[in-house]
Amino acid sequence: MVPQLATKTYTVDEYLELEIASDIRNEYRNGEILPMTGGTPNHNDISGNLLSIIKTSLRSKPFRVFHVDQRLWIPNVKIHTYPDVTVAPKLLEMQDGRKDTITNPCFIAEVLSKSTQNYDRSEKFAAYRTINTFEEYLLIDQYHVHVEHHVKTAVNQWLFSEYDDPTVTISLKFADLQIQIADLYDNIDFE
């Protein structure tokens, strides 16, 4: 029998101290620190397209829109993560004692990769659902046209829709915003 090496467990404070000094982004999951992989050109373009659409559409509205470097703290499950696109009300709520970590997103989008798609759809989505202000989740496939949209309809109730047609327009409920799927995939090469 091969002995198992013990995984070091970090406190939230230890993680934050290491994260601030780190050259790469790391996710914190209940004591474990996991490096976040770099994105592909498609991943970056899709998240950038979404960011641009939302940021332009929400100009002068009471929201803040963030891209991949904004840290999010999910206290109920002890996770620090960096969603691809995050929208929060303009009055940001921060992790206690922090000025760089938000806690009140209303919308999150993740661009799916082969290594993270199962986590993004299951455990990560379950973690996001523990956030009281969170009401909408968009998952965008980077390998072919496919978008999954989850909208909170009541406490513990979510409506799921999925789209494979680039001519379809998605309605984002949190800001009464319309996005055509083709615009998410603008300039994307699936080869």
Image: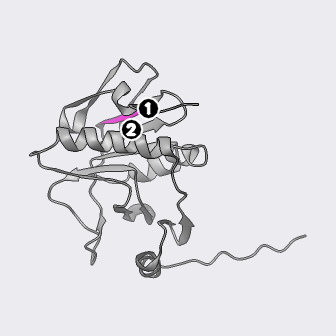
**Residue 136 in view here:** no
Residue 161 lies, in percent from the top left, at: 41, 26
Dot 1 or dot 2: first in sequence order is 2
Q: Could you tell whether 9 is left or right of 94 in the image? A: right
| Disc on res. 138 | 2
Magenta-colored stretch includes residue 110: no
Q: Amino acid at mark 1?
A: Glu
Comparing 178 with 4, the one in front is 178
Q: Which sits in the foreground, 11 or 191?
A: 191
Counting other residues with Cα less than 10 Å from the Cα at mark 1, is it few (<14), some (14-19), or many (20 or more)? some
Task: Rate crowding at label 2 as few (under 14), some (14 to 19) or many (20 or more) other CA atoms within 10 Å.
Answer: many
Looking at the image, residue 31 sits to the left or right of residue 99; the answer is: right
Residue 74 pos. (x, y %): 38, 61
Is residue 150 one of those drawn in magenta? Answer: yes
Which numbered tag is attached to residue 148? 1
Element at label 1? strand
User: Is 82 placed above or below 49 here?
Assistant: below
Task: Tell me which residue sits at (44%, 62%) in the image.
Answer: 77
| Disc sitting over residue 139 in the figure | none
Q: Position of residue 54 (x, y in %)?
A: 25, 40
**Relative to 182, 102 lies left or right:** left
Q: Residue at x 27, y 42 (%)?
A: 52
Q: Secondary structure at mark 2?
A: strand
What amino acid type is highlighted by mark number 2?
A: Leu
Q: Residue at x 36, y 44 (%)?
A: 48
Whether 93 is drawn above or below 125: the answer is: below
CB within 8 Å, label 1 to label 2: yes
Q: Is residue 144 left or right of residue 134?
A: right
Looking at the image, the residue that sits furthest to the left is 60
Location of residue 28 in the rendering, given as x and y in whole percent from the top left corner: 49, 67
Marks 1 and 2 sit apart, C-alpha to C-alpha, by: 6 Å
Magenta residues span 148-152
